Amino acid sequence: MSKKKKGKKKTASPVKQLATTRSGGTTTYYRKGRECHCASKRPAGSTEERDRRCAKRSERQRLLTSVFAFVDRLVRTLSRKLAGVNSWIPFVKDTRMSAPNLCHKVNAMACDEHGVVNFRSFVFSVGWLAVPLYTRLRRNAWTFTLEWRPHGILDETRDDDTLAVGYFYDCLPDAPRVLHLPAVTRAAGTATFTLPDPEGPGREPLSPDTVVHIYPYLASPDTDEYTRSVYLRVPPGADDTLR
């Protein structure tokens, strides 16, 4: 029997990619070798013209742009820190907004171009579960004790909600952090925890005199429902009855 000759494998010659160009508000690009056109998303004009437009912006316009860019970075960082206790994701399911967009919209007014300036109005968590009544807060260096009692009808069926704590060190207003305490339930009524990372950007230890801004909130066992976060300012040596 004669053996069939194997044909040589054909290799496609590389297609030269033509450059995309923009002119007069129209973008010209190439797809599968064909020339295509669409309206430019970028303003028409050269890089020099764009730079001149930027230079003509008012101080208010420059500030708004800087704040927007900062909050955008902050929301990305916060989303990473929240990880498995991110209330923004289930909260937006019935809306047309994305979780990052809603978080940005809610927290933008609490920030300037360098960090959070209004810690009281910053929000780590949104949700419809009943918020417990926080009654006492104590601090010893980096160890905190928080006490609460049930509040609201929904508490009767939410004893297994677990505690999460968002926080900022006062000297690091651009660095949100989150501590999830899955072993602490709503029914416990108290939690003692130690912050694991009292360090600056260069891993230098922070002074124990640093004020800490904490935002406790509760998550359901399947992390699809949450309470809103509550703001608490904690100076060194705090031992306060909360009302």
Image (tube, grey):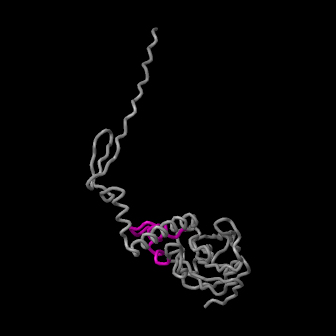
Q: Where's residue 78, x and y in %?
A: 55, 67
**Range covered by the magenta-colored residues:** 86-110
Which residue is pictured at 63% across the width and 78% down the height? 186
* Residue pictured at 28% horizontal, 40% vertical: 34
Q: Position of residue 70 (x, y in %)?
A: 49, 69
Is 10 situated above or below 134? above
Q: Is residue 39 visible?
A: yes
Q: Quadrant of residue 191?
A: bottom right
Magenta run includes residue 98: yes
- Quadrant placement of the C terminus: bottom right
Query: Which of 228 and 122 lies nearest the eye of the viewer?
Result: 122
Tag count: 0
User: Residue shown at 69%/85% (left/top)?
Assistant: 238
> Which residue is outermost to the top?
1
Residue 83 higher or lower than 25, as above or below = below
- Name of the residue lying farthest toward the right: 140
Query: Magenta segment, principal secondary structure?
Result: helix
Residue 161 seen anywhere in this rendered image of the structure: no
**x and y percent of residue 121 in the render?**
51, 81
Residue 178 vs residue 16, the one in the foreground: 16
- Determine whether, in the image, residue 85 is placed left or right of residue 96: right
Q: Is residue 85 magenta?
A: no
Q: Is residue 36 left or right of residue 16?
A: left
